[in-house]
Amino acid sequence: MKKALLVAALSVCSAFSMANAETYKFGTEATFAPFEFTDDKSNVIGYDADIIRAIGEAEGFEVQIVNMPFDALIPSILTKQLDGAIAGITISEERAKQVAFTDPYYKSGISAIIRRADKDKYQKITDLSKSRLCAQIGTTGANAAKEISGNVGTYNTVPEAFMELKAKGCEAVVNDRPVNLYFLATKKDDSYVEIPELVSGENYGIITNKKNTELLQKLNSGLKKIRENGTFQKIHQKYRCPLLFKKYSMNSIIEYFSTLDWDFVRSTGLLLIQGAFVTLKITLLSVSCGVLIGLFVGIAELSHYKLLKYPAKVYVDIIRGTPLLVQIFIIYFALPAILGMRIEPYIAAVVACSINSGAYVAEIFRAGIQSIDKGQFEAGRSLGLTWSQTMRKIVIPQAFRRTIPQLGNEFIAMLKDSSLVSVIGYEELTRKGQLVIAATYRSFEIWTAVAIIYLIMTLTISRLVAYLEKKYNSNGQQK
């Protein structure tokens, strides 16, 4: 009885301790199987995910894994959006100038994958010196490829590089060997082979901000503890063979869906539909905010007050004159560095898209207001209405009806442009597609499904806009 009470007391204390444990955000790039990829519930799994969670358990802190593009990891740490990152990151002198590395936790190497038909042509790494090579941007694989050949194409994800190899846009993919082996293990055919010779050897480490020495000490201490208690060896054994990885990816897709590719598409449809709802949510919210911003800015552009007119014009010119992608980067990476605070990917995505949409909607409203006959203004004033009352009760309602087609076009454009927020790890439809492809390398089926879902959404919105346009005649009166 006493023993049972003691166990219960210890459990309660342990639960209380974990409930009050500090939480650290660690970034990863979940298109790098087997080190990090997603399961059928969009949870990040893999070798690195198991390692960092085991370290957190050993050191008594909670781990929150944030999924984002690889080339955004270090900037996110520097701007304190993340506490650290674990993503198969090679320890290098160049990176060590920006961030702090833990002790190495994995020894890897760089290799090259070629088409089997070219096996006799490319027997050694040096045989690729005059060939076009592919690699993931910002990786040591890309650096190694540039040392091999002067013709290198870089891509956002590893699966995109392999898609280019399949399309014969390059002769080899240069990448970390475990990931290359995973690719070979997941293919149904034997169309690809690895050049036996390794390009180079390298060590992986976990990174954190140089100023965060406390976290660095915890990571090294936790890494030492899981090596000593056997947890590290168990994780290493779990992922020792690429052929074992398939049981962890997307409900055994590789094994289960061995016949019809379209069965595979249907099986992943739920994940893509979830991504579509996220896309619709961010689009609806961004355009709604954009309409409010655009209405104010559009009226300000027509104002006789210079303090309103010129700032409005500057805003419109700057936003319309710069890419949305750059605006997302500025809000997510640059502003936190200036403000000294974190901005969640969702907030950054909505703010960037709203500001971008507001500039275009402003021009739509400005043109709509200017299309209203001046006699409407005069009629309002003759009735004793003020300028603001005339705008609110007479001009703006008519202008709004006339701009319905243009506003519909803006909604559709933002629906498609929202895919750009995937660069900061926000998992909308396009990002969901990338994550599924990373675990399965079934690019044709997934991108086809993504395109169909986008088409269904845009056609539905087009029909709705056509209905609203038909409902109101060209002079703004309801039929």
Image (cartoon, rainbow, N blue to C red):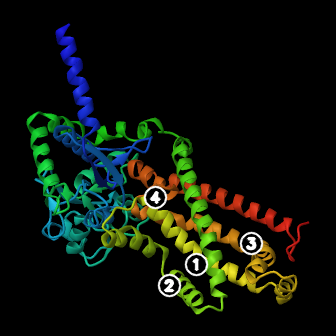
In terms of sequence position, does the residue under pointer 1 or pointer 4 come before the other? 4
Sequence-earlier tag: 4 or 2:
2
Q: Amino acid at mark 4?
A: Tyr
> Is 108 drawn above or below residue 262 in the view shown?
below
Q: Is residue 19 above or below residue 163?
A: above
The number of numbered badges drawn on the structure is: 4
Q: Position of residue 438 (x, y in %)?
A: 39, 52
Q: Are marks 1 and 3 in contact (CB under 8 Å)?
A: no
Q: CA distance from mark 2 to mark 3?
A: 25 Å
- N-terminal of the pair, mark 2 or mark 3, is 2
Judge by depth and name the residue closer to the eye, 232 or 266.
232
Contact, CB < 8 Å: mark 4 with mark 2? no
Q: Secondary structure at mark 1?
A: helix
Report the residue marked by disc 4.
346
User: What residue type is disc 1 on?
Assistant: Ala
CA separation in Å, label 1 and label 2 = 9 Å
Q: Return the residue at label 2.
A: 318
Say which element carries label 3: helix
Disc assigned to residue 359: 1
Q: Is residue 240 visible?
A: no
Question: Which residue is drawn at the image coordinates 33% and 70% (left, top)?
Answer: 339
Q: CA distance from mark 1 to mark 4?
A: 20 Å
Q: Residue at x 21, y 14 (%)?
A: 5
Q: Earlier in the sequence, mark 1 or mark 2?
A: 2
Q: Residue at x 30, y 44 (%)?
A: 46
User: Can residue 441 be seen?
Assistant: yes
Callout 2 secondary element: helix
Kind of residue at badge 3: Pro
Q: Position of residue 161 (x, y in %)?
A: 37, 63
